[in-house]
Image: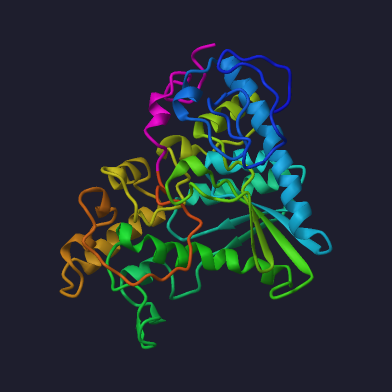
């Protein structure tokens, strides 16, 4: 930790300023003493031995708890906190965050987008029950779900013209439509949570969302703040400077972190199945792993249903097509901001290159 007397083979020990000062930027990053604002270069993290990885994670845990406590104090002092909610997608990383804040969170929140494997939803519900924590789960309104969007049946008011137009012109989405899918299927569900607590629009009450957003994930998330107050909701991302390798090391230190069997197969939660940001072959992996899942079966049915529609371009008639070629679609920006990564999907390439782990996630080198 900053200010400690511990020595490191990566950088000579030196006194530093307290957490979060803008001028407390190490010239040479020390992965055992991670900077609170600037993620350690991944190549330095991947060189660590298992024991060093665990030392680093303990430092990150203390940093995250410090940031979490400060964010709650700064943005809820003088306010009535109706609930502290850990957001769980069903993926292993979201449960790593949930485990870290288990003693603090009063609720878990799951946005059921209707684009996921049913076993993931069952895992989310059973885990909340096992932990004895209330689960808030929201789904899109009837007639406004994923397959309604794919069929081109959802209407919205154009921000450019004020006219009523299709929210999405039909067909399966590619990268250009990710913001639309996120806003319609996930963001609107999360926006209902203040209503669940009866505090929507309140000036004196707040609900806290604890999310697993991390700066190393993508360019979009590279400037994610630790705290992001939005009306009655205070978003907090205590793991902002963690790498995925750090999350895996955390799970080695805490083997009681629940692991979703679906995530173990897909390398992701199995909930974000819109596949707007699909990688090559991703749709085939979902189909091969869960051929009898209701969502997968409905994907096939809707593909057949729209196959002959002349108003839908050929490239949008197959689920997960974005992994095959560049997105030719240009659409109106529908979302003010998205808290979902543009890399929403399978684990980064570094997951399979991490020398500390084999493919089933077990440590292989000390």
Q: Is residue 294 left or right of residue 74?
A: left
Magenta span includes 27? no
Quarter of the image containing the C terminus? top right
148 or 214, nearer to the observer = 214
Foreground residue, 254 or 264? Answer: 254
Choose between 207 and 13: the one closer to the eye.
13
Taking depth in this image into account, of 248 and 232 the one nearest to the observer is: 232
> Does residue 49 appear in this view?
yes
Name the residue: 42% across, 36% down: 265
Q: Is residue 235 above or below residue 92?
A: below
146 with respect to 134 (left or right): left
- For residue 132, say whether it is visible: no
Specify the farthest residue to the right. Answer: 78
Residue 17 in the image, given as x and y percentages of width and height = 70, 33
Whole-percent x, y for residue 18 in the image = 72, 36
Q: Farthest residue toward the front? A: 23
| Direction from residue 175 to residue 304 in the image, left or right | left
Residue at 60%, 50% in the rendered image: 211
Prevailing secondary structure of the magenta residues: loop
Display colour scheme: rainbow
x and y, in percent, of residue 15 in the image:
70, 24
| Residue 314 placement: quadrant | bottom left
* Residue 103 x/y as whole percent: 77, 42
Instruction: Examine the structure image and report whether residue 358 is included in the region drawn in magenta.
Output: yes
- Write down the region rendered in magenta: 346-366
User: Where the N terminus falls, by quadrant?
Assistant: top right
């Amino acid at each position: 930790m900053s200010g400690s007397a511990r020595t490191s083979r990566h950088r000579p020990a030196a006194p530093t300023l307290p957490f979060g000062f803008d001028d407390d930027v190490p010239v040479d990053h020390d992965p055992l003493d991670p900077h609170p604002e600037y993620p350690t270069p991944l190549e330095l993290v991947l060189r660590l031995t298992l024991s060093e990885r665990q030392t680093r994670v303990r430092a990150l845990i203390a940093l995250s708890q410090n940031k979490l406590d400060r964010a709650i104090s700064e943005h809820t002092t003088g306010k009535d906190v109706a609930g502290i909610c850990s957001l769980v997608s069903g993926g292993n990383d979201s449960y790593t965050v949930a485990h870290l804040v288990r003693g603090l969170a009063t609720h878990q929140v799951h946005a059921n987008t209707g684009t996921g494997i049913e076993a993931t939803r069952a895992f989310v519900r059973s885990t909340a029950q096992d932990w004895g924590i209330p689960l808030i789960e929201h789904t899109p309104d009837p007639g406004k779900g994923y397959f309604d969007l794919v069929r081109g049946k959802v209407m919205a008011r154009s921000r450019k013209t004020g006219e009523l137009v299709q929210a999405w012109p039909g067909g399966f989405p590619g990268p250009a439509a990710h913001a639309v899918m996120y806003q319609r299927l996930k963001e609107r569900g999360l926006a209902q949570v203040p209503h669940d607590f009866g505090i929507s629009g309140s000036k004196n009450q707040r609900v806290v969302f604890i999310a697993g957003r991390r700066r190393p994930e993508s360019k979009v998330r590279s400037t994610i703040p630790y705290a992001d107050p939005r009306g009655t909701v205070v978003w907090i991302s205590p793991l902002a400077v963690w790498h995925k390798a750090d999350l895996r090391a955390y799970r080695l230190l805490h083997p009681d972190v629940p692991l979703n069997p679906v995530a173990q197969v897909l390398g992701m939660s199995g909930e974000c199945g819109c596949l707007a940001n699909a990688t090559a072959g991703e749709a085939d992996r979902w189909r091969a792993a869960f051929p009898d899942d209701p969502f997968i079966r409905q994907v096939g049915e809707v593909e057949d249903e729209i196959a002959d529609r002349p108003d839908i371009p050929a490239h949008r008639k197959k689920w997960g097509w974005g992994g095959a070629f560049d997105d030719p679609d240009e659409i109106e920006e529908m979302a003010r901001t998205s808290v979902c990564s543009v890399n929403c999907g399978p684990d980064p390439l570094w997951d399979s290159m991490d020398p500390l782990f084999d493919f089933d996630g077990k440590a292989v080198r000390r």
